[in-house]
Image (cartoon, grey):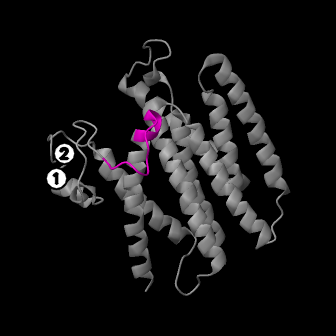
Amino acid sequence: MDFVIYFYIFLMGIPFGSFFTLAVYRIPLGQDITHNRSYCPNCNHKLSNLDLIPLFSYIFLRGKCRYCKEKIRPRYFLLELFSGIVFILFALSIKMSIYTINISKIIYFIFGLLYIAGLFIISGIDKEKIQIQTSLLIYLIVIESFYIIYLYIVEKANIYRYVIQYIAIAILMIFNVIYYKKKLKNNYTIQNLILLIEMLVFTYEACTILTIVFTLLSIAIKMIIEKIKGISRRNIKNNKQTQIPFGFYLCVTNIITLLITNILIFYRW
């Protein structure tokens, strides 16, 4: 019975992955992500329903657009696949089972997936553009706020720590707005700090600390590998190719540490 549940969770995850790729492409361009039909970014031809079947469309079309024959980037296929896998891993991490399921676990599962969805999109955009969209930071705040309201009303949880964290987010948001008005661009450092505090809100201290540690280790390992390969980083000043997508690493490692800490909590004897 549990196998059937996880199979449906995987089927639920891969369309999310398809949506993530759409959001990663359109949000930086300021395009609608909910109403306008998907299209090929090369020939702008609107895709049919057969072109939008997660995973299978990429395989059947052999990684090419049906209309212009331009190659489709493998990341679309991989993100759909990884989304399904991460959805399953998240369900496994909280010991989702037909025999132990309850309303509290279902609520956490739903909000957890919505939280992970936000991290997926933030990481995708940051890896490509080296920027964190303010709209996505606000999305995480909204998701977390609804979950905190649930915890306070139903679970009778103490929310004082959340109030302090939200004050810190508000202050950083104000600084970011001031910086934007002066420089006509967002402050990448402040946005990463906001993202980190939002991670603290949802995943607590231990997970956030591990996220920072794993992020720094990942970046260090990447730089060492590039050094060994002889990849020069002395390009044009402020060239985005020389910048480190810190938000990308934060999101990826936070998802991993969230899964690990969930396992430690839900599988403890």
183 with respect to 121 (left or right): right
Give the residue pinned by disc 1.
61
Q: Quadrant of residue 107?
A: bottom right
Which stretch is magenta?
Answer: 26-38
Q: Give the secondary structure at mark 1.
A: loop
Q: Which residue: 67% across, 47% down?
A: 198
Distance from Cα at disc 1 to Cα at disc 2: 7 Å
Q: Is residue 251 left or right of residue 150?
A: left
Q: Quadrant of the C terminus?
A: bottom right
Q: Which residue is depicted at the point 37% across and 68% down?
A: 11
Q: Amino acid at mark 2?
A: Cys
Residue 96 within the magenta-colored segment of the rendering: no
Magenta span contains residue 32: yes
Residue at 16% across, 57% down: 60
Q: Dots 1 and 2: beta carbons under 8 Å?
A: yes
Crowd around label 2: few <14 · some 14–19 · many ≥20 (10 Å): many
Return the x and y of residue 91 as percentages of the image width and height.
51, 70
Q: Tag 2, which secondary structure?
A: loop
Q: Amino acid at mark 1?
A: Leu
